[in-house]
Amino acid sequence: MRPVIEIGVALMGGIGFTMSIFIAELGFAHHPEDLLMAKSGILLASALAGISGFLWLYLTTTKRDE
């Protein structure tokens, strides 16, 4: 793989935050406000990783003529 693609794949790897939500559920079980902030931050970071990875790959890869 080219280094440009590896960077894009690394950015897309940030999407896998589902285990963080599970851990936040355990850590903030009796604090609903803190749990809401933790989940919001996790989902925002996941969305940001997906969008930035997509944009990086879309803008840096060249389209081949078929």
Image (spheres, rainbow, N blue to C red):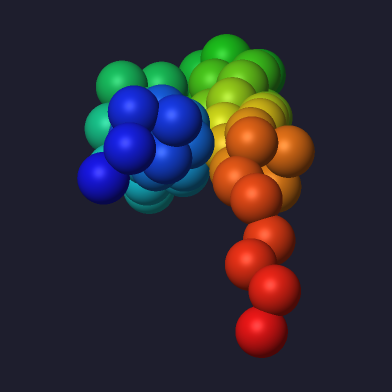
- The residue most toward the front is 65
Q: Nearer the viewer, residue 65 or 31?
A: 65
Q: Nearer the viewer, residue 28 or 37?
A: 37
Horizontally, is 26 left or right of 9 in the view?
A: left
Across and down, in percent, residue 46 comes to 56, 36
Q: Where, quadrant-wise, is the C terminus in this rendering?
A: bottom right
Q: Quadrant of residue 35?
A: top right
Across and down, in percent, residue 17 comes to 39, 39
- The residue most toward the bottom is 66
Q: Residue at x 44, y 30 (%)?
A: 4
Q: Residue at x 26, y 45 (%)?
A: 1
Regarding residue 41, the answer to whether it shows in the image is: yes
Across and down, in percent, residue 8 comes to 48, 36
Q: Nearer the viewer, residue 2 or 38?
A: 2
Q: How many marks?
A: 0
Horizontally, is 53 left or right of 14 in the view?
A: right
Horizontally, is 18 left or right of 48 in the view?
A: left
Q: Quadrant of residue 44?
A: top right
Horizontally, is 8 left or right of 34 in the view?
A: left
Regarding residue 10, the answer to whether it shows in the image is: no
Q: Nearer the viewer, residue 1 or 9?
A: 1
Q: Residue at x 57, y 15 (%)?
A: 34
Q: Residue at x 64, y 36 (%)?
A: 60
Q: Is residue 58 above or below residue 53?
A: below
Q: Is residue 40 above or below residue 21?
A: above
Across and down, in percent, residue 9 comes to 39, 42
